[in-house]
Image: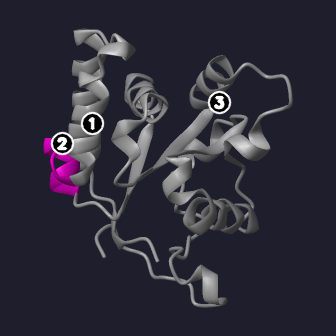
């Protein structure tokens, strides 16, 4: 596994969640500056919500962290896009769980590019994808990305496409957690 850390084996479903050290997992500068959310979780719900992301959120909460995930971080009646943007801005760092269908979601790509735009520390979890495929937008992730940007009905601007390509390249260039795959 890249990125260090050990995996928890306390329960059958937690074998995939890295053990998180508190502190120094969060740098002292982040601990001093309080934000509403300690960790923003960016993920493709269809790929990872029930088999990984919820478990990760619960593990982070058990360590005393405040993760933002759309199922607990949003109230009924909230408008989605502004609420997500506010959570990104008001988070200390982000974990991007990049799965095979992550790049066929405009929502995921907008979140990822916004995280980099806000200069958040992004820790990628490469879930069923190779970091080099994320960097180069190839493999299954690349096919989904191409399908999204070539969908005539979506009318995607060249500026958005370039912003998304840059965010995927940046994420693929970060040392993260690898070796996760759907079970």
Q: How crowded is mark 1: few (under 14 residues within 10 Å), some or many (20 or more)?
A: many
Q: Which residue is drawn at 25% across and 20% down?
A: 161
Residue range corresponding to the magenta coloring: 131-139
| Point 39% across, 31% down: residue | 109
Q: Mark 3 points at which residue?
A: 87
- Residue sitting nearer the eye, 56 or 39: 56
The mark closer to the camera, 1 or 2, is: 1
Q: Can residue 175 be seen in this view?
A: yes
Check disc 2 and report the residue beneath it: 137
Give the alpha-carbon distance from disc 1 to disc 2, as whole Å: 7 Å
Residue at the extreme front? 153
Q: Are marks 1 and 2 in contact (CB under 8 Å)?
A: yes
N-terminal-most mark, 2 or 3: 3
Pick the quarter of the image with the N terminus. Answer: bottom left
Q: Which of marks 1 and 2 is nearer the N terminus?
A: 2
Residue 8 lies in quadrant: bottom right
């Amino acid at each position: 596994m890249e990125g260090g850390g050990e995996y928890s084996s306390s329960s059958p479903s937690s074998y995939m969640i890295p053990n998180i050290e508190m502190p120094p997992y969060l740098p002292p500068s982040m601990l001093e500056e309080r934000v509403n959310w300690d960790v923003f979780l960016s993920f493709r719900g269809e790929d990872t919500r029930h088999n990984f992301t919820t478990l990760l959120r619960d593990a982070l909460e058990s360590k005393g962290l405040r993760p933002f995930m759309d199922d607990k971080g949003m109230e009924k009646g909230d408008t989605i896009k502004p609420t997500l943007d506010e959570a990104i801005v008001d988070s200390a760092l982000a974990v991007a769980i990049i799965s095979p269908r992550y790049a066929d979601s405009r929502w995921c790509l907008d979140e990822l590019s916004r995280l980099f735009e806000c200069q958040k520390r992004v820790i990628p979890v490469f879930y069923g994808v190779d970091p080099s495929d994320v960097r180069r937008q190839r493999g299954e992730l690349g096919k989904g990305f191409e399908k999204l940007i070539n969908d005539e009905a979506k009318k995607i601007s060249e500026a958005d496409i370039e912003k998304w390509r840059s965010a995927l390249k940046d994420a693929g260039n970060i040392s993260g957690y690898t070796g996760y795959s759907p079970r």
